[in-house]
Image (tube, grey):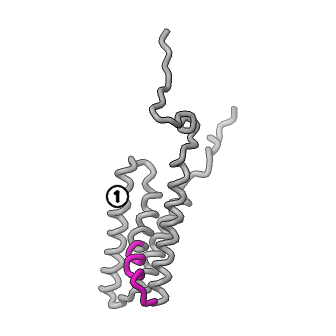
Amino acid sequence: MQTIRRISTSSSGIAEETGQGPGRDLLPLLAGAATVVGAVGAILAFADVDSPLRGPLTLFFLLAAPSAAIVAALRGLEPFGRVLASVAGGVTVNMLVAQGMLALHQWSVPGGIAAVTAISTLILLLVLVRRPRGRASSGRAS
């Protein structure tokens, strides 16, 4: 009979086996920081504040908002594929909003940010509505 052992190569093998390593809390912290940075960028653009941070933070918001909504919709893909497809989708949403607003002669920075925010929110809400909440009963009597 052969015994399969789990070999830990790090000094904190017990913490890694239980899933409580030092890197577990980093992802929610980064997500929160990205949300704050994006929100500050949108607020600076809507308020028309003259700041050197307005451009980069607004650009971050315009790329991150639709990308985050699209990455939530792509649950079945591998992580690298999800990131790549969501960034491409975010750029596409921005380009379609810009082209539509220019074609209608309605271009404005606050209007573009509002349109991208609305589309990103709609995508995220559609994902949340479509996601099953739990196992549904099959309807058969036992």
Q: Amino acid at mark 1?
A: Ala
Furthest residue to the front? 11
Residue 69 at x, y percent in the picture: 46, 64
Q: Residue furthest right?
A: 142
Residue 73, compared with residue 5, is above or below; it is: below
Q: Nearer the viewer, residue 53 or 63?
A: 53
Classify residue 96 as left or right of residue 32.
left
Residue drawn at 36 percent across, 78 percent down: 97
| In-front residue for pair 43/96 | 43
In this picture, which residue range is highlighted in magenta?
49-60
On screen, 101 above or below 2?
A: below
Which residue is located at x 38 percent, y 81 percent?
55
Q: Quadrant of the C terminus?
A: top right
Q: Which residue is mark 1?
A: 85
Q: Nearer the viewer, residue 91 or 7?
A: 7
Q: Residues within 10 Å of mark 1 (few under 14, many from 20)?
A: some
Q: Is residue 58 highlighted in magenta? A: yes
Q: Which residue lies most toward the top here?
A: 1
Count of numbered badges drawn on the protein: 1
Rendered location of residue 50, percent (x, y): 42, 90
Residue 78 spot, x, y in % from top left: 38, 47
Q: Residue at x 46, y 81 (%)?
A: 114
Name the residue nearer the viewer: 14 or 40. 14
Q: Residue at x 50, y 70 (%)?
A: 121
Relative to 24, say whether 85 is above or below: below
